[in-house]
Every structure is written in C-alpha cells, then in structure tokens.
Amino acid sequence: MKGPVLVFAESSGSQLRKAALEAVTAGRRLADELKVEEYVLAIGNGLKEIGTELGKYGADRLLVCEDPSLGLFHPEFYKQIALDAIRRVAPGTILLPATSTGKDLAPRLAIHLNTGLATECVQIGLENGEFVATRPAYAGKVLLKVKINGSPKIATLRPNVFTAKEIVPRNLSVERLLFSRPDTKMTVKESVAHDAKKMDLTEANVIVSGGRGMGGPENYKILEELAEVLGGVVGASRASVDSGWRPHSDQVGQTGRTVSPTLYVACGISGAIQHKVGMVNSKVIVAINRDPEAPIFGFADYGIVGDVFEVVPALTRQLREFYGKR
Amino acid sequence: MPKRLFPSLESAPLGRLQLKIVVCVRRVPDTASRVKIASNGRSVDATDFEYVINPYEEYALEAGVQLKEKHGGEVTVLTLGPEKSTQTITKALALGADKAVHLRSESFPDDPSCSARALAEELKSTEFDILLFGKKGVDDDNQQVGQMVAELLGVPCVTQILGLEVADGKAIARREVEGGSLIVETALPAAFTAEKDLAAPRYASLRELVAARKKPVTVKEPRSQPSTLETIAVQYPPPRPPGKVVGKGVEAVPKLIQLLHEEAKVI
Ligand SMILES: Cc1cc2nc3c(=O)[nH]c(=O)nc-3n(C[C@H](O)[C@H](O)[C@H](O)COP(=O)(O)OP(=O)(O)OC[C@H]3O[C@@H](n4cnc5c(N)ncnc54)[C@H](O)[C@@H]3O)c2cc1C
Ligand SMILES: Nc1ncnc2c1ncn2[C@@H]1O[C@H](COP(=O)(O)O)[C@@H](O)[C@H]1O
C-alpha cells in the first residue's frame, strides 16, 4: 500500500477513454488518502495532448509509451510495458478501467506479480488503512466487499460508475518509455468497427433499449430517432439479440453489457432479472410497456403503460419541441 | 448460427488436424436462483442453489466440439470443484466432450488465482492445441482465470472471442471490443475465452446423457495456495425506490418530459 497509485489510462485512437479519466479521478482521491503520488501509464500510437488533460484530472506523473505497433491492444505488448512501468514505479495500488482491454490485461499482471485482483469494482477506498473494494456478484444480487492479500493491490473500475472530475490542474511530469517489441506468437491483424459513429453502450450517457416488444428489426428505427434527440445510443434485450434483430454488442444484461447511463429508456422490455442486472444501476430508468404487470414497472423510476409504436414517436416529437424551445 | 468469419481459411485444404482441445468448465448457480447472504455476513448461502454449467462455458464447449467435428481430434473437459461437480462434467460429456479430468476438492479457496494455479498445474502435463475458457463465471463475475492460466503456461490467450477458426497450425479469432472487434491470429497451442454466441450450444439427448456416464473421468486432488482475494463482507445492493407509473399511452408523454426535466433533472 505504501507505493504510489498507478493508473492505466486507456486510449482509443489518439484520445483517452472516458473510463480512463474516471479511473484517474478515482486514483487521485486514493492517492490523496494515502498521501502518495499518482502515476499514469498511457500506451498507444499518436496520442494527442494527453498530458494536459491528465493533469486536469489530478495525475502527478505520466509515463507514455508510443509505437506504431501499439495502436491496437496487443495483450503481450501491453503486458510487457505495464510490467516495466510497475518495476519502475513500485506502486502500492494499480487501477485500470474495466473495459475489454483492462479486463484482459489486469489478470495477467496480477498473476505475474503474485497478487490479487478485484474486477468490476463500483467502489474503492481505505478501511483502517487497508485497501477495500466493492464489486457486484451473483448477477448484481449482492455486493462483495473484498480485500487483496498481496501487493500491489489491483482493481478494475466499472465504467460510468466513478465520475471523472477536473480539479486544479497539476504540473504533470512526462516520461517516455522505450518500447522493445517482445517475441510473440500473436498478431493483432485488424480492427473492424461495428459502426464507427456509435459509442459503446458502457460509455453512453443515454441508452434507449428495445426488447421483443419491438416486433422486428425494422422497428428499431423509432428507437434510433428517440436516441438521437436524447444524444444517446440504442441497446437491446437478449430476446431481440437472439432473434437476430440486433448485434450482440447491443445486448444489455448478465450475458451482455453492464451499463450505468444517466438515462435508460426500456421499450418493450419485460425486465427479467438477467436484463435488470445489466441496467439497474442507471441513474434514471424509464419504461414503456403495454403490460401494466411487466416486472420492469417494479423498478423503473418512470413508467408509461402503452404501446411503444404510439408512445415512442410521440415522445420523440415532444422532446424535439422541448429541446427546440429551450 | 456459427457464421463463417474467415472464408479464405475454409477453402484451404485442411486435412484432418486431430486437434487436442481442452475446455475448462465449472458449475454456477442458475442465474434465476435467489441469493441469500449467509449468517456470517461474509459469504452467500448456497443451500438452495440449483447448479448449471456456466453459460459462457457452454459456448466454449460447443466451439471446441465443433472444431473436433471439423478437424478430428478430441475434447477433454477440465473441472476444479467439489464432488457435486460430477453432474456438470456428465452434462459436458453429453454435449460432445470425450473425457474429463476432475480436480476434486470440497474446500478449495474461492479465489481466481488459486483456481488458475491449480488448473495450470494440471495443464502443464497435458498436451493441447486449443484451450478454451468461458469469458467469466456468472456467479463471481471475476473474468480472471482464463488469462491467468494462459500466462502461467506461457501460451497466447485471446479473450472475449466471438469467432474461431483453425488452419495450418494457426488460429484466427475475432475478439469483441468496445465499438467493434479485433481480428487476432495466433500460433497454437493457444488459449481463448468465449464471449456469448461464440457457438450456439446444442441440446443433449437422453441417449447422450446415458452414454456420457460411460466416458472416462480421471479424478485428482488439486493443490491450493493461500488466497489473494478475500471477501470480508457481503451486502445487498441498496434498493431502488419502487417504480412509479406516470400514466397511460400518449397522454402521459408531457408529464414524463416534465418529470425528467424538473424532478430527475436528466434532460
Ligand atoms: C443465463 C441467462 C442469461 C441471460 N442474459 C440476458 C441478458 O444479458 N440480457 C437480457 O436482456 N436477457 C438475458 N436473459 C434472458 C432473460 O431471461 C429474458 O428472457 C429477456 O431479457 C427477455 O427479453 P424481452 O424483455 O425483450 O422479452 P419479453 O420478456 O418477451 O418481453 C417483451 C415485453 O414487451 C412488451 N410488449 C410487447 N409488445 C409491445 C408493444 N407493442 N408495446 C409495448 N410493449 C410491448 C410485453 O408486454 C413484454 O413485457 C438471460 C437468460 C439466461 C437464462
Ligand atoms: N473451478 C474451475 N474449474 C474449471 N474451470 C474454471 C474454474 N474456475 C474458472 N474456470 C474457467 O475460467 C473462466 C473464467 O472464470 P472466472 O475468472 O472465475 O470468471 C470460466 O469461464 C472457466 O472456463
């Protein structure tokens, strides 16, 4: 626990991910409690101006490793760089965003360092001077409070749970790490985007989700329109993914994405437990369902009992007016 | 369901590769189970749990069985767990695995790195080309064991895959990431963790379930290490306030917008 806090600031292209800034903010708070410095590690290719940005979120020192071969996540390359950085910084705590990259990388680090890892944490802090993390388990039906036996303590933080907050900017020192490409039997050949414009559900602020009640893939158009006015993205229940209406990357729930947007609008979704666990931590939940007995009404903040094909277009139209008016 | 991701590979003259495939499988409580906190406040009460194969491992197992059916070879199931895991092993054998290894322990630490070390210890002396895991156990949601085992064995590991094809001693996998996927090529042997829908699980017939009981299962004792992750308390999540219905049909829309703006302050 003695050493600095080291945060892996994941980037996507030349930009830092929102989840990375959330982790840097959480790391700053922990570093203050521990009275240690916060180091940030960034790996990528063509990262722009990230030093200034990271300084705003409270980082003291930045280690950057850039190379054309680091543009896409390669677990063995990233692992080597992270282990290098860890040797140099001797951190007491390591935080990573619980993104596909963070969740791939963190266990590799933990096993190499012979320490423990708490994944998908929704809370971290100190109790009696000891690092304690809270993480959901059993499909979110319980929260486990865990401690790590071993050092450093490693945790991945669930995106959209910790808030990224700018503070008085620090004068961040930047050190460049050299990358010497390790031998590897793995090649990351290419990245295929689903839809280059679409933000991932885990990072979205507003999600409009459709379930079996949407009746077919063509009807998602009305959800796309509602999402557009709200500045959000479209998600789905498993029933609509299994019907082939939507890609798996849109699925919210236990075997899909766990999301916590500010606003989640569930349209034609019954609210089965396996769906609920993926979205119940949204700040505000709206449900539109024609069945007044649907379980979703048991936990939605605001429900409308009605037909999605009537209510959704009306909502879209009136929201347009609402935003136009202001 | 399984889409051909890499048509170029499919048309290549393959021959029978005789792949040795190992799938790591374990049981988890059915996701519909009620979860009660045990009286010690530090664990969950498992007495009423109904167990099933972890869903992600059903995808992994099916992918393994399909590779065997295509290329020839055999599928071994590896399970670390109590005696009661036998049911899960039988199910996996009925779903197309040929044999199983059961690292049997009634009191193994519930800790990903301990599990990983015990599984890796067994796999060190096992020949394999393809090692498959689920992405995560849906009980603890750790998502750690696959990568850890691979690191301990020093084999490449591609996580969260939605597609897998094998040819010429290599594998190509499609890995699901935010906003898209990465196409990753790796030499064999290699490890993979399955995302939902890697392969559509089949159903086991009664005949297959009966036949499964005759397939060989080797039972061994795993070695445990001190745990690195310790649960110190279990709590129920804070309840959401009970749901509120604003109204019926289109007439309720203005009220909803007003509430979202003035009360919830999210628009
Ligand atoms: C191991 C496991 C994992 C699972 N993982 C997930 C997961 O990750 N995500 C997930 O979502 N599910 C998951 N499920 C499935 C889950 O149990 C439900 O089956 C699923 O969520 C149901 O989807 P749905 O609400 O779209 O469909 P239904 O339950 O069929 O609900 C459709 C709803 O639409 C309403 N409706 C119909 N027509 C209209 C209309 N015109 N206007 C308004 N309302 C209408 C109906 O009243 C109904 O409430 C999982 C299940 C298992 C066993
Ligand atoms: N006790 C075990 N026996 C066999 N395989 C396991 C065990 N624990 C974990 N695994 C494998 O590792 C994957 C990830 O597990 P976890 O890290 O616990 O989420 C699972 O989907 C399984 O394939």
Image (cartoon, coloured by chain):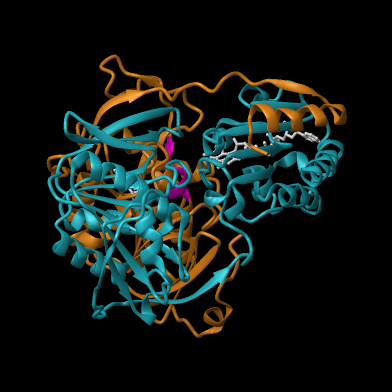
Between B241 and B46, the residue placed more toward the observer is B241
The spot of residue B97 in percent (x, y) is 40, 54
**Where does the C terminus of chain A fall, quadrant-wise?**
top right
* Residue at position x 52%, y 85% in the image: B12
Q: Colour of chain A?
A: cyan
Q: Is residue B57 magenta?
A: yes
Q: Is residue B69 magenta?
A: no
Q: Colour of chain B?
A: orange
Marker count (numbered): 0
Is residue A176 in view?
A: yes
Which residues are drawn in magenta? B52-58
Q: Is residue A269 above or below residue B196?
A: above
The spot of residue A62 in percent (x, y) is 28, 64
Is residue B125 in view?
A: no
The spot of residue B43 in percent (x, y) is 29, 24
Q: Is residue A80 above or below residue A268?
A: below
Residue found at the far top of this picture = B39
Q: Is residue A291 above or below residue B167?
A: above
Between A281 and B11, the residue placed more toward the observer is A281
Between A143 and B97, the residue placed more toward the observer is A143
The spot of residue A39 in percent (x, y) is 25, 57
* Residue at position x 64%, y 26% in the image: A301
**Where does the N terminus of chain A fall, quadrant-wise?**
top left
